[in-house]
Amino acid sequence: MNMFNVRAWLAVLLGLVLLASACGGEVSDDAGDDDGVTAASDNASEDTVDDSSSEDATTGDAGGEDDGGEDDGGEAAEGDEPNIYIDPRGGVFADFQAGFDRGDHPFTQLDSYCVAHDAAADRVDTDDGISADEISIVHIKSRLEDAVNIGFGIPVGDMNEMFRVYVDHINEECGGIRGRMLSLETIEVSLFGPTTQEERNAACLQATDDYNAVFILNSSGFQGSATLCIVEENETMFISTQGQPDEFMERSGGRLFSLSNTNSENVRFAAQDLLASGLLTSDDVVGVAAPDTAGQPEDVEEHLVNVLRDAGLEVVFDIIGCGGSTVCTEGVSESVTNMRNAEITAFFNVMGILTAPGYIDEMVNQGFQPGDVQFFASDFNSQASELVSGQIANSPTSGDLYNGAVIIDFRDTGLYRAEGYQPAPLQEMCAALYNENNTVGALHSWNDPGDSSYGMSVSVCNIVRTAARGIYDAGDNPTRDDVVAAMNALGPVDFGAMTPASIEEGKGALPNVIQTLDFSFPCTQPIPYERSNGDPVCITGRNDFRPSPR
């Protein structure tokens, strides 16, 4: 693999991990032609705040011990007031929290990561990885530090230490989960290179055969056939930050969970929303150029192109070749010529971190001027990330052309730029716990523009606690199937900046809302995304969150 392809592959895979923006929040990744990087942070802007709400309040408190009984499931006892967080942002945030009764559940409180509770009596060994005293979990880590030597280091902190801190806190401060301690193992795989997929499959087998993992957890990018090795072949639960194909979700038997939408949801939700809002109408001629990466043309055609055509829009749909690499250049010039001849008025970007810049450059070369085309995107191939879409501005004329792109996605990218921004209680609780208990001297803050570790710590915090909640809800002596059933019945879940999210039967992708985001270049907003190779860019959400059009 030559240095260019290594750097390219890396740039993308880095994003796979990042559930953190430079200023905090949440980063997530998508499987795509470049594996993708996504970034986000949350903000409560004034127009969403309900003045009648207290700024940071719950109507209940975790306080005291939980009896650990199998039937309480963390619900408030009959006659008790519900334990509801009053979200000061109002709107969909307040509506979501109104339906999330945290009761006295030891793994849903906002003033403590977990609450000490009684151990279940008469614990016995029940299943592989579930003994009377321990439950096995495995963190598979892609070695992001591999990127440093070729100039792609991104500060996301010590992920191994993050997983250790949150697991140790559950074991040491809260009595484990109904008396069972979490037994954490870590397996590391390379970030890039010709053996990466083999290493991922080997990690799957080590986690499932050697460690009998009940859960496998990942916050650093993990995709491809190894995912099916985990959830289908070895019937093990997997929680990842990365968006997964619908097919994998269906084949997982309810064992695959993601902090991102599925690939097809990304483009389908965007298409439906743009049509409903009138940002796209039957008068538009829309251009779409999809990479020929396995599965992507089919997802784009079915869930984007056909949705627009069914609504009466003319769509010019091309497939560009990648030659098995992460850079897709085959047929780009011809595709741009097709767009020019069709006189497109809009272009929907579904390309990856290394492909989109070259395509937009070619649009400039063939005479497209700012204002000729309205650009749209979703998080398909991570185009809701400043790190990914910012590469389009490597050529300033291409950045000027793409300026004003509208993105539809669940991420809260850039909301921290609003005056008076404060992180959500969940973010602050997670970050404080890590800052106070890590052994590597880390002190991560949301407003450090050079540090994405705050968001990563929040992401890991959410992943571990979601798994713990599923194990707790499965009862005193659960089998692996009991934990699967409990996970699929969690309902409302805590997620990053407390954005509405849930896990339900048949829905393992957590997000429940979308918003409109805007790409600006050059960016003059506070705390812009600074780039080493040019003027800063920004993706900033409008904070107009609404339910996803499922």
Image (cartoon, rainbow, N blue to C red):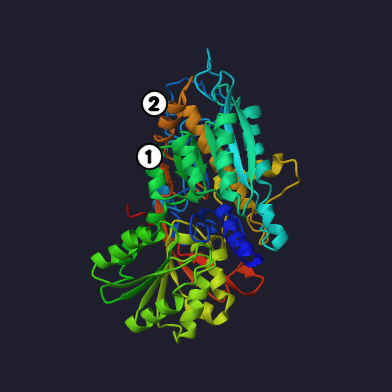
The image position of residue 273, as x and y in percent, is: 33, 62
Pointer 2 local density, CA inside 10 Å: few below 14, some 14–19, many at least 20: few
The nearer-to-camera label among 2 and 1 is 1
Separation of marks 2 and 1 at Cα, in angstroms: 27 Å
- The numbered dot on residue 201 is none
Q: Earlier in the sequence, mark 2 or mark 1?
A: 2
- The numbered dot on residue 79 is 2
Question: In the rendered image of this protein, does residue 322 appear above or below residue 131?
Answer: below
Q: Nearer the viewer, residue 338 or 378?
A: 338
Q: Residue at (53%, 15%) from the top-left corner?
A: 124
Residue 419 appears in view: no
The image position of residue 345, as x and y in percent, is: 35, 79
The residue under label 1 is 504
Going by the numbered disc 1, the residue's amino acid type is Glu
Residue 149 appears in view: yes
Q: Quadrant of residue 447?
A: bottom right
Pointer 1 local density, CA inside 10 Å: few below 14, some 14–19, many at least 20: some
Q: Secondary structure at mark 2?
A: loop
Going by the numbered disc 2, the residue's amino acid type is Gly
Q: Nearer the viewer, residue 67 or 292?
A: 292
